[in-house]
Image (spheres, rainbow, N blue to C red):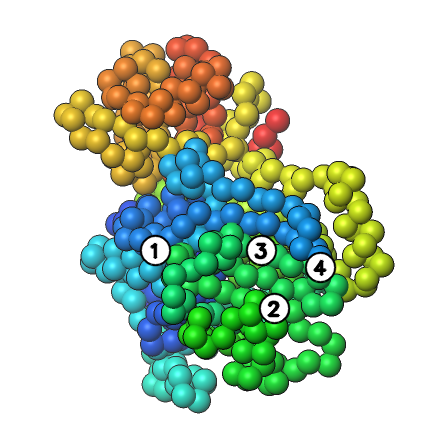
Amino acid sequence: MDPIYDIAVVGYGPTGLTAASLLGRLGHRVVVCERWPGLYGLPRLTHIDHEAARTIQAAGDVDHALRDSSLSEYVWVNGKGQTLIKIPADPNGPLGFPDHISMYQPDIECAIDERLRTYGTVDVRQGWAVTDLEQDADAVTLRLRGWNADKVTADGPHDQVRARYVLAADGSRSGVRELLGVERQDFGFNEQWLNIDTEWLRPQPPEYAVGTQYCDPARGHMTINIGTRRQRFEFALLPGETTEEMTTPESAWRLLRQYHDLGPDDLRVVRRLVYGFEARIATRWRVGRVFLAGDAAHAMPPYLGQGACSGMRDATNLAWKLHLVLGGQTPDTLLDTYESERRPHVTVLTHAAIGLGKVANTHDVEAAAARDAAFAAGRIPPPPPFPPISNGVLRQNAVTPVGILTPQGRIRTADGTTGRFDDLTGFGFALVTAEDPTEALGPERLALLERLGCAVVSLDTVEDLDGRHGAYLRHLGAVGYLARPDFVLFGTAVDRTDLGALVDDLNAALFGTVRTAA
């Protein structure tokens, strides 16, 4: 049986939506298999960073997606209300968006869903659960059954789809991961918190516009804004408290009154749910033609706000690599760099989130006092910066940094069109140079870049309206830089002669043996 689809995406949350939209945008035949009959419609995540916002820009209408968003600033306080950590937000992040954003998840999912349905190549099959899979040398067959939402079981009609590759983004309880027999490493972090999502019945008080984590040994709790009109409150479950008793309306209002002096005249409760926070990473992210992504590959506590952002990074990383492999431009071995690039990054963020979780969940009074004293004395180092990509498709033996994120500013093209850089250059590689690189590259290298869908942007022919791209070149001490489709810096050219070598190195990285970066 010949494959019908290029890619099957299992799961239709942020990771699956992103993957399906990017692959559809690149012209691939995609089928989405999602057991629930519609979009979730409620906010599970409340925070994204500027990299995730830039990904949403590639996958949907980002302005529509973030229409009810706001800056997401955080403060961590102890049980006495004394500040331990402040995490500010930069409204002018280098990727073209604030670096911390509070937003309403359904707006994002609807914006991406609406965009991908316009491509004509994405078949969204909601109400179907994957019950089995079988791989052969050419493709994967997924066996499906209709999902009964009332009984929460797959007992409907049978069907199957076949695709050359499968991206499993079906959550932390991934059925695909279980079918593959992939285990997860458990890092030993397990906490249960009550989540109360609300809508304001009056203007949001200013103090609630800043997310606050209360590191109180008596009961950890927190509040965070969801855009501008909604608020989330979370409370740690104490020993002996059960999900059943804590999710009652009485318990919710008791906690809201006790900790925030809020009642039914202030808020409307939208949802009450107990979440289990965990830290687990799958031991393998690729099994043949099947890839795990998002929570199916890694689950981390929410304290860093990077769970969904990490899943969207997975989707973007895989999308451009699948595009090249499916188009016959690169060998299948390119896909092995997905896990080798993403696992180290996710592992660092997971451990950082665990560390913050331990701060928030210090229940011993004496230990909490020692923690507070250490913060007051400045003995607690700040969280480390996000790590760069350290191996995979990067320029080898580079003399300037690689694997970091490249900026996005606004540009004006020669015909007067003005907009964000990515909107005018597309989702793909981008070579940005200080001057016209045509002569330095020559026809063969320019043809290679064209085949790869690489935009060539010379800053002497476009107007760098924010000065962001020119400043980045000066910061790197380079005359040009080459960005991957996932905004990662592949490498730089230190002079015009080096521009040709930079493109040659990209060719080698994609088609040859990928080595560890220096």
Q: Earlier in the sequence, mark 2 or mark 3?
A: 3
Give SS at disc 1: loop
Q: Is residue 4 visible?
A: no
Residue occupying image coordinates x 41% and y 15%:
479
For the residues carrying marks 2 and 1, which lies nearer the camera in this image? 2
Instruction: Tell me the residue that label 4 is attached to.
Output: 79
Q: CA distance from mark 2 to mark 3?
A: 12 Å
Instruction: Please state which amino acid type lies under the numbered disc 3.
Output: Thr
Q: Earlier in the sequence, mark 3 or mark 4?
A: 4
In terms of secondary structure, where does tag 4 sit? loop
- In the picture, which quadrant includes the C terminus? top right
Q: In the depicted view, which residue is nearer to us: 304 or 12?
A: 304
Alpha carbon distance from label 4 to label 1: 32 Å
Disc number at residue 212? 3
Query: At label 4, which amino acid type do we have?
Result: Gly
Give neighbour class at mark 4: few <14, some 14-19, many 20+ (Cα, 10 Å).
Answer: some
Work out whether mark 2 precedes mark 4 in sequence or the reverse, and give the earlier one.
Answer: 4
In the image, 372 versus 64, the foreground residue is: 372
Helix, strand or loop status at disc 2 = helix
User: Mark 2 or mark 1: which comes first in sequence?
Assistant: 1
Total number of numbered discs in the rendering: 4
Q: CA distance from mark 3 to mark 4?
A: 12 Å
Residue at mark 2: 259
Tell me, for residue 68, which label it has, or none.
1
